[in-house]
Image: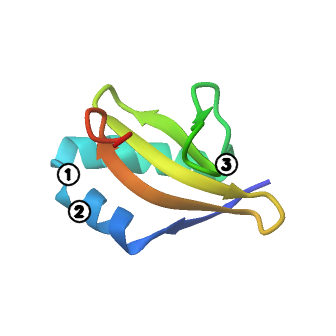
Amino acid sequence: MAYQLVLKPRAEKDLADLPREAQRRVDACLLALATDPRPHRAEKLRDAGDLWRVWAGREYRVLYAIDDAGQTVTVARIRHRREAYR
């Protein structure tokens, strides 16, 4: 069961601003989210409403929301780990 992947404009800019190697890791993570939006290391954020977080390598985090009814994963932000939860 594949989900449609939607990147918000801010997430697209975040992705474009990353170094090339980090972009490759994040791209692989995004493709995996389309297949399985709740992978083993994903975690629902407590104070962020319906947002989830998954690691994209050691340094970057992908923050996203899941709509099971609409079969979509909406990526809100792609941030460095020190900035992801501010």
Residue 45 drawn at (x, y percent): 57, 38
Point out the residue furthest to the front here: 47
Please, what is the three-letter code of the amino acid marked with disc 3? Thr
Residue type at mark 2?
Ala
- Do callouts 1 and 2 mark residues in contact (Cβ within 8 Å)? yes
Rounded to the nearest angstrom, the CA distance separating label 1 from label 2 is: 6 Å
Rendered residue at 34%/43% (across/down): 86
Residue found 65% across the figure and 51% down from its top = 50
Q: Which sits earlier in the primary sequence, circle 3 or circle 2?
A: 2
Give me the C-alpha separation between circle 1 and circle 3: 23 Å
Residue bearing mark 3: 35
- Tell me which corner region of the image, top left, top right, bottom left or bottom right, holds residue 14: bottom left
Nearer the viewer's eye, disc 3 or disc 2? 2
In the figure, 64 relative to 72: above or below? above
Question: Residue 64's x, y, as percent?
Answer: 54, 52
Give the labeled residue for mark 2.
16
Q: Which mark is residue 18?
A: 1
Badge 1 amino acid: Leu
From the image, state whether disc 1 or disc 3 is nearer to you: 1
Q: Position of residue 63 (x, y in %)?
A: 47, 48
Residue 70 is marked as none
As displayed, is residue 21 above or below residue 12? above
Q: Label 2's element? A: helix
Q: Secondary structure at mark 3?
A: helix
Q: Nearer the viewer, residue 2 or 15?
A: 15
N-term-proximal mark, 1 vs 3: 1
Neighbor class of circle 1 (other Cα within 10 Å; few <14, some 14-19, many 20+) is: some
Please name whichever residue, 57 or 50, is drawn nearer the observer in this view of the structure: 50
Residue at image x 64%, y 33%? Answer: 39
